[in-house]
Amino acid sequence: MIETISFTLNGKSVRVEADGGQPLLWTLRTDFGLTGTKFGCGEGYCGACTVLLDDEAVKSCQLPLKSVRGKSVRTIEGLARGETLHPVQRAFAEHDAMQCGYCTSGMILAAVALLKKKPKPTLQEIKDGMEDNICRCGAHTRIVQAVQAAAERMAAGERR
Amino acid sequence: MSETLNRRDFIKLLGGGIVVMVGVGDAEWLVGQEPARFQGGGRSLPSDFNAFLRIGADGRVTCFTGKIEQGQGAISALPLMLAEELEISPSAVDMVMGDTDLCPYDMGTFGSQCIRAFGPALRAAAAEARSVLIELAAEKMSLPKESLQAGGGAVFEKAKPAHKITYGELAKGQAIARHVDPKPSLKKPAEFKVIGTPALHRDAADKVTGRAHYAADIRVPGLLYARILRPPAHGAALKSLDVSGAEKIAGVRVVRDDDLIAVLHAHPATAVAALAAVKAEWDVSDTGLDDTNIFAHLEKSAPAPRIAAQGGDLAVGAKAAAVSFDETYYNSYIAHATMEPHAALVELKDGKATVWASTQAPFRLKDEMAQTLKIPAANVHVIMPFVGGGFGGKSRNLQAVQAARLVKAAGKPVQVAWTREDEFFWDTFRPAALVKIKSGLTEAGKIVFWDYEVLFAGERSAAQFYDIPHHRTVVRGEWGGGGGGAASAHPFDVGAWRAPASNTNGFARESQIDIMAAKARKDPLAFRLDNLADRRMQRLLKAAAEKFGWMPIQSPSGRGFGLACSDYAGTYVATMAEAEVDKATGRVRVKRIVCAHDCGVAVNPEGMRLQIEGCMTMGLGYALTEEIHFQGRRIKDLNYDTYELPRFSWLPKIEAVLVDSPELPISGGGEPAITTVGAVVANAVFDACGARLYQLPMTPARVKAALKK
């Protein structure tokens, strides 16, 4: 059913007319041109499509568009402040925490949500928290290091 | 057929500057790399070279290469090789990759060839550019060129380094085309200033912000998103089709082009809904083959044997053996399962096509597009976005051919982006394979004969590197082909998978070596060192052992230590791992890995470590869980719920040890390390619990079965 759905996207109020049952992923990628959110498996198994919904990591391929009504969605494009990268983005770049980069948006947003809940995670808590995000290239070692480094920076007062 | 531009026009096209081309046949790497050089493919490039660099008036240096970036890090390593010879900072280098209008022909990005094969040619071009710049400077400064030197992006007077002229100034107003010197004087490793220094990913800024574009991220006006009707099994015949439900949806276009049936819409969500409304019935015939009986079938269907290596006399060796071994190893079909499913966008305007695709072979794609669209290859322009992982799977371009067929039918630009289920269905798999090894030991524990036969994996890394007097390596079948036809043994298409053949051969060889070491009651490391004459491999094994803290002991010791070594495309690898086995569940957990790696010189040590870590982590998948289950020609694993990839909870501590052999040519690093993972885990499992696994993956059920033996 076509309906009008209003929500906050990367800090701005937006409105879209669409079938409320369609996955948020296609709306982000097509209606808003935010292609940093990736299609990976379409079934919620891989986490490539992860976005933040009111600061929680959710899989946008499984999320009906209507369920974001009145809520706040943040994608990878809305994470940096201007040219200033989020500490997690910076840590990913500085630790080479990627190879092909296709899972990277989802990894970063999953890590942001994890650190929101657990600002000082143990190694085990990082692995548990990132478990639902798949990386095929095997950048896991660096991703864990990046999340650790970001946690330390954020504890030391870097933004968020 | 395209008209090839002459050199002068070509330089003008680039906007002038100094251009150095790497010629066909100049560098050794070209020999044999291009058995069938594509003719008529170049839209505007002179056809007698394969790569070039250009120095612009702004002092920036652009490297044009047909290679693509798929996560292997060529985009970060190649600038180091260029910068080294040209005496500039790597940050002054811009990379243009895989664009078929701008870059010269390249066969494809596979086989760990970016550094090993393309690298020397690029260095030669840079060395030639340096000598051109010194000549120009000599003229401008009215000094003999012997008194000049290049450094820091400028040419300066040796006696008065402040007296200099920058590359940018030298390139200004020039339109110079030079061919690479056939015998360039490249720097010796001892002279390296840039090669061997760690460099971070150049593409990181784009990849952490979502700005990096992959094929499915490209948008053009009027774009239609396609969803393709996938049969339930390969070879299934369409019995009935009802598209009326889909056609009722506003804006949906249904295309039927022979066996290709697709729905198109301007919004992907609507295309998904439209495909769901298509009703199709299929006839599926069962071949009776499945993932359990496939090996017997493959054994019966193996092509004629071909001897890949031999020495001595096997009969003499067998007689000299005090103890003999006869084992068979099995390896399953596995998927590439790249995070990015295959995608392509094809736009056709006024008889000219522009194509963006996830491919490892843009130049072959160009020809395939020309054939499908029935236009001259010169009218096809392939532009390469980032590729979200390839591992061999993106060497064929089926998704782009589908897109081109739909473009012809729809008359509008079309994007084909496979779903994950499409990916598991239309991608090629690494072939299931068998290896049979007969071998024997003398009383003293020396390997005296080695009779090796590999079925369907392929030749790469099949020939052993131990010091064995009587040996033979027989290869039956390669990794490509398949398709399920009468001529094919495989029920579906198979193809290259990261380090093709070598993962299967490495698993079999290093398992057999371990079995012999255990029988001889020798420490597996000491046994290998005793049976190796190759000093380079001995040194690498010792380097791994030192980092790992290997203590000699007979296996199975209960401590769960394993090792394996391999050679791949000139690179040597020695890996040690510690694993634990839950005897109740059969679950294997790898706790720690040390991988010693010798690729001559690691051009970008940071990138090399990343590749090693990636190989180790990815390799755990084919070692422990990855396997395609099928019935007849129906694929049972279509997504990540049943096809289990390595996850964070699996992650062992991984340490890479980089060992240099500066006297050797620089070799590749994208694939070699992964070839050790199957065997190193199998050998660690044996050491942990005494169970010998002969089949990959080592699933809990297989481990439990082996424990009962």
Image (cartoon, rainbow, N blue to C red):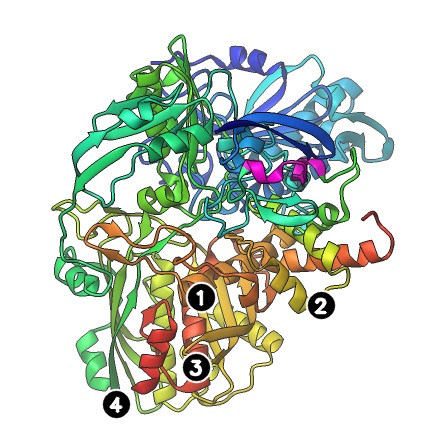
Q: Which residue is mark 2?
A: A122
Amino acid type of the residue tagged 2 in the rendering: Thr
Which residue is more in the foreground, B112 or B149? B112
Q: Is residue B444 left or right of residue B157?
A: left
| Disc number for residue B322 | 4
Q: Which element type, helix, strand or loop, lies under badge 1?
A: helix
Separation of marks 1 and 4 at Cα, in angstroms: 29 Å
Q: Quarter-wise, where is residue B708 in the image?
A: bottom left
- From this view, report whether residue B657 is shown above or below residue B693: above
Give me the residue at 51% from left, 45% from top.
A62
Q: Is residue B336 left or right of residue B173?
A: left
The tally of labels here is 4
The disc, 1 or 4, on the residue closer to the chain's N-terminal end is 4
| Disc number for residue A102 | none
Q: Which residue is mark 1?
A: B676
Protein chain holding label 2: A
Mark 1 vs mark 4: in front: 1
The location of residue B71, given as percent across then percent down, is 54, 45
The disc, 4 or 3, on the residue closer to the chain's N-terminal end is 4
- From this view, report whether residue B291 is shown above or below residue B440: above
Q: Is residue B433 left or right of residue B544?
A: left
Mark 4 vs mark 2: in front: 2
Q: Residues within 10 Å of mark 4 (few under 14, many from 20)?
A: some
